[in-house]
Amino acid sequence: MKPSLYGLPTCDTCRKARNWLARFDVAHDFVDYRATPVPAATLKHWAAQLGGWEQLVNKSSTTWRNLLPQRKNPGSDPEWTLLLKEYPALIRRPVVLLPDGTVSVGFSDNGFKKLFALT
C-alpha cells in the first residue's frame, strides 16, 4: 500500500510536497479533495488523529477569514464536517495518510524526512 497525499493541485505547498516525494522516490497517490470529496467519517477520523478539528482547519486562510462569524464556531462533528464539505480549502494542506493509518498535515523537508523515515 502507498501513502496518500490529499490536497489541491494548484496549492504551492502541495506542489512542494509532491516534488519532495518524487525527489526521494516515495511512491504515493495524490487525491484532489475538491474533485474527490473526503467522506465525513474520514474527516472525523483525521481530526481525531491530529488532536481535534483545530489541527485540521487552516484558520489563517482567506477562506476562513471570509466566513461569516457564526460559521467560525462549529459546535459538533456534523457541523465541522458540513463546513469542510462546503469549503474544502479550509483543510490544511497537504494531508498525508500513511498505510499504517498515521495522519499528518502540512509540509516541511525535515517533517517529511521523519514521517517517511528518511533521516
Image (cartoon, grey):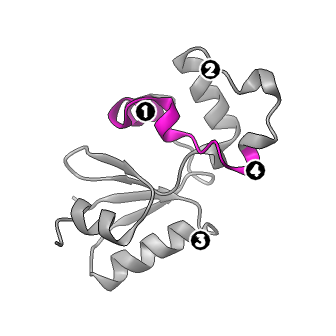
Residue 16 coordinates in the image, percent (x, y): 48, 75
Q: Earlier in the sequence, mark 2 or mark 1?
A: 1
Instruction: Tell me residue 40's x, y (percent).
Output: 51, 30
Q: On the rendered structure, is 112 left or right of 117?
A: right
> From the viewer's perspective, is residue 65 above or below residue 2?
above
Q: Is residue 74 left or right of residue 102?
A: right
The structure residue drawn at horizontal position 59% and vertical position 71%, both measured from the top left corner, is 12
Q: Amino acid at mark 4?
A: Thr
Q: Is residue 15 magenta?
A: no
| Left or right, residue 63 beside residue 77 | right
Q: Nearer the viewer, residue 25 or 55?
A: 55
**Residue 28: mark:** none
Residue 87: percent from left, percent from top: 69, 41
Q: How many other residues sit within 10 Å of disc 3, few (<14), some (14-19) or many (≥20)? A: few
Residue at 57 percent of width and 19 percent of height: 78
Mark 3 or mark 1: which comes first in sequence? 3
Asked whether disc 3 touches disc 4, contact meaning CB atoms under 8 Å apart, the reply is no
Name which of mark 3 and mark 2 comes first in the sequence.
Answer: 3
The residue identified by callout 2 is: 79
**Residue type for callout 2:** Glu
What is the magenta range? 43-63
Task: Read off the residue under disc 1.
Answer: 47
Sequence-first disc among 3 and 4:
3
Reading the image, the residue beneath label 4 is 62
Up-down: is 42 above or below 13? above
Q: Which residue carries the number 3 mark?
A: 12
Q: Point out the image quarter for the N terminus.
A: bottom left
Residue drawn at (79%, 35%) of the image = 67
